[in-house]
């Protein structure tokens, strides 16, 4: 799919192998300058063919950055190989309509304790996000405007029914397999299956299906309800905990924490360095780049999205659970975040669509000083994001008369180094795959929010958790 950049800056492009950068955070520096975040500096580090590190980390997202920071802090020589010309992966701080925006992950919750602790470590803080004044919710015919407090209170009662039983099957929310014995049946359920089990009015089912479709990327029948049941448990089984997930943003932008982590002495970051092959040999691990160059290390942290593992040649081949996970996919295929600049005086309207809405979710952002307001939308499968008239019509479903000045759609499913957006497990993946994915495989260990135990898939908290875990596992290997 192609995105329709209107007035936003162009996306970064993948530098050809011949122009690959061997810089410490070079891309991050350039980008940070563009968004007004203080860039970190570091000496330029040149890697030569066959260079050896204690550890190679593949992927400079939050999982890779956390693992690299931990290992470098232990005095190990760490090389981070990042395919893109920037750090962050599925977090991408950018500029649009003169404002700093997030094309990927954007919110953090106070319940994300690891992220909160990391932010304190680097002196970073959060700010509250815009609070909606109106919620537009599905009605029997069309949509209805509601007081957001009333709308959320009702949604909360629906969630209580949908997630009923989660206190028993997820009694320790960060340890989802603690009562694996109770999960056999529930782990097989999709969102559609679970909604069908509930006895409630059709309109309430419409609310639930519409809510979940924004998260499943229009795949309510293909994604496991236990994924979000675990988030419900992690938020304390309350609507208040649930709402906190999108209530706060890092004041310096979502990438700032990662920039600090990767500035740790002992880390050499190589941008524009896609890895094509990883061979675990008797003399260590050899990692081949797209240029053909081979780097060596005592251990490797594979911190790419699960959906990307299938594009890397592993020798020996990956275990069956890993192959199944990357073949089936964990990252949601339709994960298109749209930033829109609306003209005129627009209230802070939150809108939730139905399962077949072109725009199943719209979240209000700040008013602009020159007039107008920013909005975030998440596309449904029926929306052609290259068609401005279609995007505008989708917004007008919720705000009649709204006019789009410009918009920018980031399609994570079409991104070659993500091959999907946030992670959301499929039915049976929890029991069938998660335990194996967390184990070292020879001198390889795996990290990434897609395989987190706690805030799995859609949270940098999960990426940080697995980065910390991977560093512990590596410490036993080198
Ligand atoms: C639209 C969207 C909204 C989201 N909203 C939120 C939110 O509000 N809050 C929140 O906490 N989380 C959110 N998330 C989820 C969050 O962004 C991710 O869970 C998290 O960033 C994943 O981190 P990671 O390190 O596991 O993976 P990634 O960030 O994907 O990092 C993996 C890295 O590996 C690199 N890579 C891939 N292939 C190769 C290769 N062959 N060689 C070298 N490098 C490679 C990639 O370029 C990437 O930099 C959102 C995600 C999306 C897409």
Image (cartoon, rainbow, N blue to C red):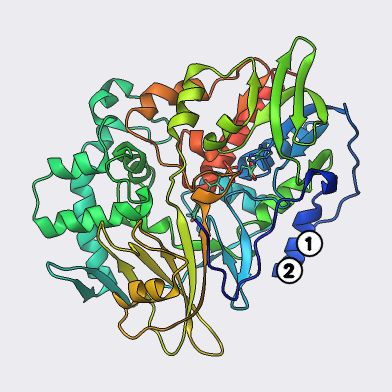
Residue 234, image x, y percentages? 39, 43
Q: Which residue is mark 1?
A: 30
Q: Split into 4 quadrants, where in the image is the C terminus?
A: top right
Q: CA distance from mark 1 to mark 2?
A: 7 Å
Taking the spot 56% from the left edge, 90% from the top edge, the residue there is 370
Looking at the rendering, which quadrant does residue 38 occupy? bottom right
**Residue 156 makes an appearance in the image:** no
Q: Which mark is residue 260?
A: none
**Front residue (pair 317, 246):** 317
Q: Is mark 1 within 8 Å of ligand 1?
A: no
Q: Is mark 2 within 8 Å of ligand 1?
A: no
Residue most toward the top? 282
**Front residue (pair 351, 118):** 351
Proximity of marks 1 and 2: CB atoms separated by less than 8 Å: yes
Residue 6, image x, y percentages? 56, 74
Q: Does residue 259 lie above or below 139 as drawn?
A: above
Q: Which residue is mark 2?
A: 34
State the SS at label 2. Answer: helix
State the SS at label 1. Answer: helix
Q: Does residue 35 lie above or below 202 as drawn?
A: below
Looking at the rendering, which quadrant does residue 378 occupy? bottom left
Taking the spot 29% from the left edge, 62% from the top edge, the residue there is 357
**Front residue (pair 216, 301):** 216
Taking the spot 88% from the left edge, 37% from the top edge, the residue there is 47
Q: Does residue 98 lie above or below 40 as drawn?
A: below
Q: Is residue 345 left or right of residue 281?
A: left
Q: Is residue 86 left or right of residue 17?
A: left
**Front residue (pair 212, 41):** 212
Residue 460, image x, y percentages? 54, 47
Q: Residues within 10 Å of mark 1 (few under 14, many from 20)?
A: few
């Amino acid at each position: 799919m192609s995105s329709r950049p209107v007035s936003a800056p162009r996306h970064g492009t993948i530098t050809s192998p011949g122009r690959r950068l061997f810089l410490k955070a070079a891309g991050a520096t350039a980008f940070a300058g563009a968004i007004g975040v203080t860039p970190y500096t570091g000496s330029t580090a040149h890697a030569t063919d066959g260079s050896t590190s204690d550890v190679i980390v593949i992927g400079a997202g939050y999982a890779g950055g956390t693992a690299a920071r931990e290992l470098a802090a232990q005095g190990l020589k760490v090389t981070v190989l990042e395919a893109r010309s920037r750090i962050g992966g599925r977090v991408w701080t950018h500029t649009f309509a003169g404002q700093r925006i997030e094309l990927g992950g954007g919110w953090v919750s106070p319940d994300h304790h690891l992220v909160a602790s990391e932010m304190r470590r680097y002196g970073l803080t959060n700010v509250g996000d815009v609070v909606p004044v109106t919620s537009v919710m599905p009605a029997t015919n069309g949509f209805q405007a509601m007081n957001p407090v009333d709308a959320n209170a009702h949604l909360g009662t629906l969630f209580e029914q949908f997630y009923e039983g989660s206190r028993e099957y997820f009694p320790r929310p960060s340890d989802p397999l603690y009562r694996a014995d109770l999960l056999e049946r529930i782990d097989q359920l999709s969102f559609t299956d679970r909604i069908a089990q509930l006895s409630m009015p059709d309109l309430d089912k419409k609310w639930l299906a519409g809510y979940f479709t924004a998260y499943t990327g229009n795949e309510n029948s293909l994604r496991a309800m236990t994924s979000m049941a675990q988030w419900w448990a992690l938020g304390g089984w309350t609507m208040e905990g649930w709402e906190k997930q999108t209530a706060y943003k890092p004041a310096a932008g979502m990438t700032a924490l990662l920039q600090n982590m990767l500035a740790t002495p002992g880390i050499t970051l190589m941008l524009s360095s896609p890895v094509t092959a990883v061979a675990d040999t008797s003399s260590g691990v050899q990692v081949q780049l797209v240029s053909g160059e081979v780097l060596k290390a005592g251990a490797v942290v594979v911190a790419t999205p699960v959906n990307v593992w299938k594009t890397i040649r592993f020798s020996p081949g990956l275990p069956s659970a890993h192959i199944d996970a990357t073949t089936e996919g964990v990252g949601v295929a339709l994960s298109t975040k749209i930033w829109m600049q609306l003209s005129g005086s627009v209230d802070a309207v939150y809108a939730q669509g139905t399962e077949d809405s072109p725009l199943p979710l719209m979240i209000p952002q700040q008013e602009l000083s020159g007039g107008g307001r920013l909005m975030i939308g998440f596309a449904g499968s029926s929306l052609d994001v290259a068609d401005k008239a279609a995007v505008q019509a989708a917004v007008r479903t919720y705000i009649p008369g709204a006019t789009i000045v410009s918009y920018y759609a980031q399609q994570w499913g079409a991104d070659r180094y993500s091959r999907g957006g946030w992670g959301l497990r499929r039915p049976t993946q929890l029991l069938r795959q998660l335990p194996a994915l967390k184990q070292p495989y020879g001198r390889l260990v795996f990290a990434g929010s897609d395989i987190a135990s706690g805030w799995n898939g859609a949270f940098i908290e999960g990426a940080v958790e697995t980065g910390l875990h991977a560093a512990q596992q590596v410490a036993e290997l080198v």
